[in-house]
């Protein structure tokens, strides 16, 4: 399973990149609003740090405007992927951009039918938001399970990015279901590494090592 980081914070991206497990980055307008500096410069720097796909989102709602915005964003770097919201206008834009060879990530996906349509339009990635569904008492991971099955049934090549991740357990579930990618906030990435028994084990080995004749 590929691991993306869900942030526009350069410090966090550099740190995660140094761990050697990072496959890509997702940003959105909210994440960029938390950072200082011109958004284009930030995206350019992210694309320099990370070799894999870096999602940048359009803010237009009309297909023609989305396509214009996407073409501009795509000039930032070769690894930019355009995030398009899951609407009828978004579908039209995805179709055009796919034909032009520009990669897309269909965002704000909350139903299996939305994911089916996005794949039919040719989207490169689809992003079901599990945490936001959990927040309103729907099992977000049920959606991921359905998308995996539907894509398998028809051989769609669209990759599923499990988004809106809140806890390490979301990642365990996504990996068990067979989703291609999880996009993970930095704080959750850190939690993935830790286990108290590992820390206790290291401490015990170090104490016992002192007793070994050297
Ligand atoms: C995905 O690409 C989005 O940027 C993100 O996962 C949304 O997460 P949130 O629901 O925590 O805002």
Image (cartoon, helix red, strand yellow):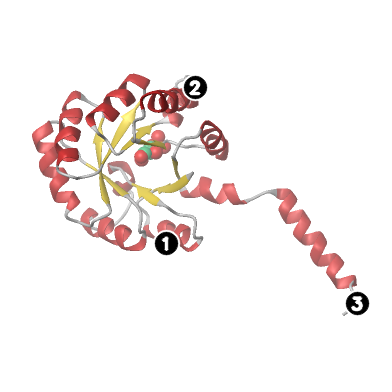
- In the image, residue 175 sits, relative to residue 74, either above or below, namely above
Q: Is any atom of residue 40 visible in this view?
A: yes
Residue depicted at x 19% and y 50%: 74
143 vs 176, left or right, is: left
Residue at the disc numbered 1: 14
Q: Secondary structure at mark 3?
A: loop
The quarter in which the C terminus is drawn is bottom right
The quadrant where ligand 1 appears is top left
Which badge, 1 or 3, comes first in the chain's sequence? 1
Of the numbered discs in the image, which one, if any, rests on residue 139?
Answer: 2
Residue at the disc numbered 3: 213
Which badge, 2 or 3, comes first in the chain's sequence? 2
Task: Please identify, in this view, whether the residue under mark 1 or under mark 3 is nearer the observer.
Answer: 3
Q: Secondary structure at mark 1?
A: helix
- In the image, residue 61 sits, relative to residue 201, either above or below, namely above
Q: Residue furthest bottom?
A: 214
Q: Residues within 10 Å of mark 1 (few under 14, many from 20)?
A: some
Front-lying residue, 65 or 135: 65
Which badge, 2 or 1, comes first in the chain's sequence? 1
């Amino acid at each position: 399973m590929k691991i993306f980081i869900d942030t526009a914070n350069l410090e966090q991206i550099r740190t995660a990149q140094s761990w050697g497990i990072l496959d890509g980055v997702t940003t959105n307008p909210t994440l960029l609003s938390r950072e200082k500096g011109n958004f284009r410069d930030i995206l350019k720097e992210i694309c320099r740090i990370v070799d894999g796909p870096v999602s940048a989102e359009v803010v237009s709602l009309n297909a023609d405007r989305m396509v214009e915005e996407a073409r501009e964003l795509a000039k930032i770097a070769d690894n930019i992927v355009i995030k398009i919201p899951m609407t009828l206008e978004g579908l039209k834009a995805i179709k055009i951009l796919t034909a032009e060879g520009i990669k897309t990530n269909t965002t704000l996906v909350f139903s299996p039918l939305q994911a089916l349509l996005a794949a039919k339009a040719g989207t490169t990635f689809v992003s079901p938001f599990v945490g936001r569904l959990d927040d309103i008492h729907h099992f977000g991971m049920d959606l991921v399970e359905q998308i995996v099955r539907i894509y398998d049934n028809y051989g769609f090549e669209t990759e599923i990015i499990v988004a809106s991740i809140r806890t390490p357990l979301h990642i365990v579930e996504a990996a068990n279901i067979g989703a291609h990618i999880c996009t993970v906030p930095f704080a959750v990435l850190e939690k993935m590494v830790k286990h108290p028994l590992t820390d206790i084990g290291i401490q015990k080995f170090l104490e016992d090592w002192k007793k070994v004749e050297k």
